[in-house]
Amino acid sequence: MTEFSWIIQRPVFDTRLDEAKAALESLGDNVTVCPSNTLDLDTEALDLGSPLKPCVVMGSFYLCKSILEAIEPSDNVIIFYSDKKYHYTETAEFLGDHALNNEYSLLPLFEFEKRYHETLKNTKMFFRPNSGLKTFSGSILTPETYQSEFIMLNNWGLRNELVVYSPYKEIDLEYRFWIVGNKMRAYSEYKRGMGYEFEPSEPPQEVLDLVSEFEFEEEDPVYLAPDNSYVLDVCMSEGTAFVVEINALSTSGVYWCDLEKLFTAIKERLLFESLISL
């Protein structure tokens, strides 16, 4: 298979960073591990590939944005990310009734804080930024935690951030699926109940059946996915499978997925798309 160049970073691979580097090198590719602190990122020093050796980037939002802003549009650099494609309100149209939080509302954070304090503070509410930049992680507000949560987000300068909020729904387990070329290519359980420490299991059939509904042919007239490659987070809630959210592939954590299978699927898809010269 054609040689690729990869730029990878710990925010996506966490404790599996060395394992990811070894898996890519076993596929015959060049790998650059970018430091997690990229505030002074020198994009000119990075190996951004060539027409015969394209570069795939998997790292933080900041890393992906910095590289996209520093380069001219090019088929040589592949970043499965866009801050314009992954707004929750837009992906919700794609998900329809399959979305766990399909009965949502949208407000600036400071307005949501006021509403929660005045009318909702005795209830549990899910909320997250609408932006695909994920300026903060989705969270559950409770009567015990809401004040500290809002103080923290206001201190981060996010009072005008548009947030999506909806009634809290109990989640039993969650899986992440990597959709590459509109087909499911890898998966990993990543949460069970309220915990993250467990032995990952195979997805229930109900979850697999739901994921299969997101495997499209691109000429399908109802095709509305933000990209042909992305991650789909699916949960079981009260015995039913739902999609929690869609996220960009390049910026999403890999958890315990089969890394070699994921990397191979990405390479095969890019070759199929003729982004490189065979």
Image (cartoon, rainbow, N blue to C red):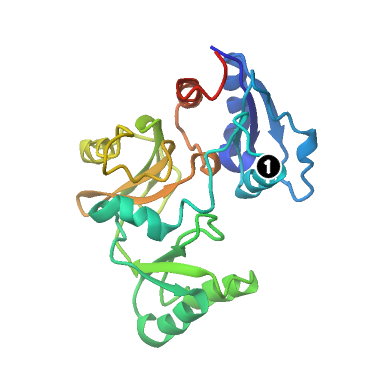
Q: Residue at x 61, y 16 (%)?
A: 3
The answer to which of 5 and 220 lies nearer the viewer is 220
Left or right, residue 139 beside residue 75: left
Residue 250, quarter of the rendered image: top right
Looking at the rendered structure, the number of numbered marks drawn on it comes to 1
Residue 60, quarter of the rendered image: top right
Residue 153, quarter of the rendered image: bottom right
- Amino acid at the residue labelled 1: Ile
The answer to which of 12 and 82 lies nearer the viewer is 82
Circle 1: element type: helix
**On the rendered image, what quadrant is the C terminus found in?**
top right
Left or right, residue 256 beside residue 278: left
Q: Which residue is mark 1?
A: 67
What is the x, y in percent for residue 100?
29, 56
What is the x, y in percent for residue 47?
73, 28
Q: Residue at x 37, y 44 (%)?
A: 225
Q: Residue at x 39, y 33 (%)?
A: 187
